[in-house]
Image: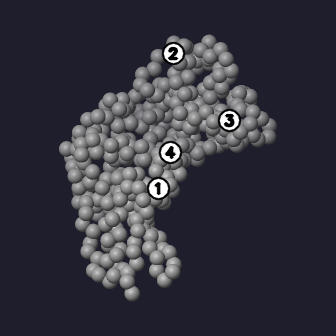
Amino acid sequence: MSNPIITIFVRHKEKCKYAGDEFTKSCRCRKHLRWSKDGKQYRKQAGTRSWSEAEDAKRRFEDQLAGRVVKPQTQARTIRTAYDDFLLAKKVKEITDDSYKKYEREILRFIAFCERRNVFTLEAIDLTLVTAYKATWPELFPSSATRAHVQQLLRVFLNYCHAAGWITRVPKMDTVKIDQPPTMPLSGKEYDRLLSAVPLEFTNGTAGRVRAIIQLMRWSGLSVRDASCLLRDDIIVHAKGKYHVRTERQKTGVHVRVPIPQAVAEEILEAANRGGAHLFHESAKGTEVSFSQQYSRKISSVFERAGIECEGHMVSHRLRDTFAVDLLTKGVPMEEVSKMLGHESITTTERHYAQWAKGRQDRVDELVTATWRS
C-alpha cells in the first residue's frame, strides 16, 4: 500500500489578514499537516509557525510512515519558535495575565532587536549581543528597577531554552544596580493640600473620581492600577458601618484584605459607576493598563497643583508609602503590613520600610537601655 500524501496547511488566527488562504507562506500562524488513509482524514500540528520548518516536519513524518529511520532534527532552532513554546509553558503554569503579558512584550522586544542584527537562531545569541541589547535600555526604561525586571524576564526565557536543550549555555549578565528612591510618605498637612487641589485641577465630574481613587490608595495601600480597576464586589460591606477592600494584586497575584474608614468607603461608592462590574473602569474606554496610566497622570497633576515635589517616576506610589508608614509608626507589625501591601515576601517590605517600624525600634531601645541597668 502506498504511503499517504501529506499536505501542509495553515490554521489562521481570527484577525490574520491571510485568513481564507490555508496554503499561504506569508503569515506567522501555526502550521499543520493533513493526510488521508483508509477513507479517513487525519491532522496533526507541525509544531511551528514557519513554513520551511513545517516542510522539515512533513519530511520527517513521511519517513516515519514509510518505516524509514528518522534522523534526529539538527536544524538550529529559531528564537521565534522557542518564544512560542516558552509562552505555552507559561500558560500551562497558569501565571497571572499581567505576568504573561510582560513576558510576551519584553521577549518580543528582544526578538525584534535580534532580527535587526540578522540574528534569528538561539545558537547565535551570545554575550556581545545581549550586552548590545542592554545598552538600549536606559533610553527605553529610565527606571533602574524596570531595567532589572526586564533583565530577569530575559534570563527566565534563556534559562528555559537551556533547560530544553536548545542552547548549551546562558550568557552571564551583570546585575543591574537599582537606584532605590527613598520612601516618601505624605505628612498630614501635605495630604490635606493634595485633596484640596483636586477640585482646582479638575472642574468637571472627573474630580470626584480622582479624589475617591486617591482616598482609596491612601487608606488601602493599593497601587494606582489596583485602585482604578477595582471591582465593585471588592468593597465588602459589613454591619455597623464596617468596610473592607478585598482583592488580588495585579503585580504579585497576592490576595489582600484591608479595612477602610466608613467615610472613605462611602465616598468611593458615591463616585463609582452606577452599573457594571468595575467601580471606576469602563471596558469600552480602553484596557485596564491604559486606564490606570491615565489616572496615574491625573494624580501626578494633582501633586503638582498642590505644590508637593516628588522625585522619580512613581508619584502615585507616595500614597501607598503613606498607608504603610502610618501603620508602622503606630506599631502595626511589619508582617501584617506586608500582607496588607500584597508583597510576596516580607523582605520586600523590610527593604522599603524597615526604618519606619516603631515596634522594632522600641524593642531595640529596650534591649539597649536594659544593658545600662545591668
Cβ atoms under marks 3 and 4 closer than 8 Å = no
Residue 189 higher or lower than 351, as above or below:
above
**Closer mark to the observer between disc 1 and disc 2:** 1
Q: Position of residue 79 (x, y in %)?
A: 31, 53
Alpha carbon distance from label 1 to label 2: 55 Å
Is disc 4 surrounded by few (<14), some (14 to 19) or many (20+) residues within 10 Å? some
Q: Amino acid at mark 2?
A: Glu
Q: Which mark is residue 98?
A: 4
Dot 3 or dot 4: first in sequence order is 4
> Which residue corresponds to the image point at 35% horizontal and 32% vertical from the top-left?
140
Side of 268 where 239 appears, left or right: right
Q: CA distance from mark 3 to mark 4?
A: 20 Å
Q: Nearer the viewer, residue 72 or 217?
A: 72
Label 1 CA crowd tier, 10 Å (few <14, some 14–19, many 20+): few
Residue tagged 2: 304
> Looking at numbered disc 4 in the image, what kind of residue is underneath it?
Asp
Q: Residue under label 1, please give it.
A: 21
Badge nearest the viewer, 1 or 4:
1
How far is disc 1 from disc 4 in space, using C-alphas? 34 Å
Q: Are marks 1 and 4 in contact (CB under 8 Å)?
A: no
- In primary-sequence order, the first of circles 1 and 2 is 1
What x and y, as percent, mark residue 136? 29, 34
Question: Mark 3 falls on what kind of element?
Answer: loop
Task: Tell me if I can see residue 188 in this picture.
Answer: no
Which residue is label 3 attached to? Answer: 279
